[in-house]
Image (tube, rainbow, N blue to C red):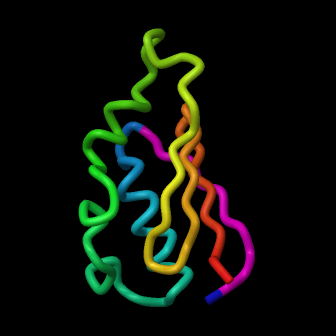
C-alpha cells in the first residue's frame, strides 16, 4: 500500500463510488472487480445523490469512511481524498 494521499474529482460521467473504486484499484494494481463491493461499506448511490450540485446541500459536511485499508473523505464539491491507513 502506498502512503501517499490521492485527490480525485468525480465528474458527470463518473460517480463518486466509481472514483473511489478506480483510484484504490489503481493504487493496489488490481482490477476494480477484485475489490470488495463499495456498497458493503457505503451506500454509493446515496452518496452520489447527497453531493449533487443543488443549493439544498450547500454547507453539507464531508463524508468520511474506511474502505479496503484506506481512509476516504468526500467533499461536497465532489473532491475525493484517499489516504492509506497505517
Measuring 72% from the left and 81% from the top, which residue is drawn there?
3
The N terminus lies in quadrant: bottom right
Left or right of 45 on screen, residue 27: right
The C terminus lies in quadrant: bottom right
Most foreground residue, 37 or 25: 37
Q: Position of residue 77 (x, y in %)?
A: 57, 32
Residue 8 within the segment the image draws in magenta: yes
Left or right of 38 on screen, residue 54: right
Q: Position of residue 50 (x, y in %)?
A: 38, 31
Q: Position of residue 18 (x, y in %)?
A: 36, 58
Please tell me in which quadrant of the rendered image residue 12 appears.
Answer: top left
Please tell me in which quadrant of the rendered image residue 85 appears.
Answer: bottom right
Count of numbered badges drawn on the protein = 0
Q: Position of residue 48 (x, y in %)?
A: 35, 39
Q: What's drawn in magenta, residue-wise?
A: 2-11
Measuring 60% from the left and 64% from the top, which residue is drawn there?
82
Q: Residue furthest right?
A: 4
Measuring 49% from the left and 74% from the top, which residue is drawn there?
24
Q: Is residue 40 above or below residue 28?
A: above
Q: Is residue 74 above or below residue 30?
A: above
Measuring 57% from the left and 52% from the top, which residue is drawn there?
73
Q: Residue furthest top?
A: 55
Please tell me in which quadrant of the rendered image residue 32 appears.
Answer: bottom left
Amino acid at each position: 500500500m502506498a502512503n501517499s494521499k490521492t485527490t480525485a474529482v468525480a465528474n458527470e460521467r463518473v460517480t463518486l463510488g466509481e472514483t473511489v473504486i478506480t483510484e484504490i484499484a489503481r493504487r493496489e494494481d488490481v482490477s476494480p472487480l477484485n475489490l470488495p463491493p463499495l456498497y458493503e461499506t457505503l451506500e454509493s448511490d446515496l452518496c452520489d445523490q447527497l453531493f449533487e450540485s443543488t443549493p439544498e446541500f450547500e454547507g453539507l459536511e464531508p463524508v468520511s469512511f474506511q474502505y479496503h485499508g484506506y481512509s476516504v473523505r468526500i467533499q461536497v464539491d465532489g473532491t475525493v481524498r484517499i489516504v492509506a491507513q497505517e
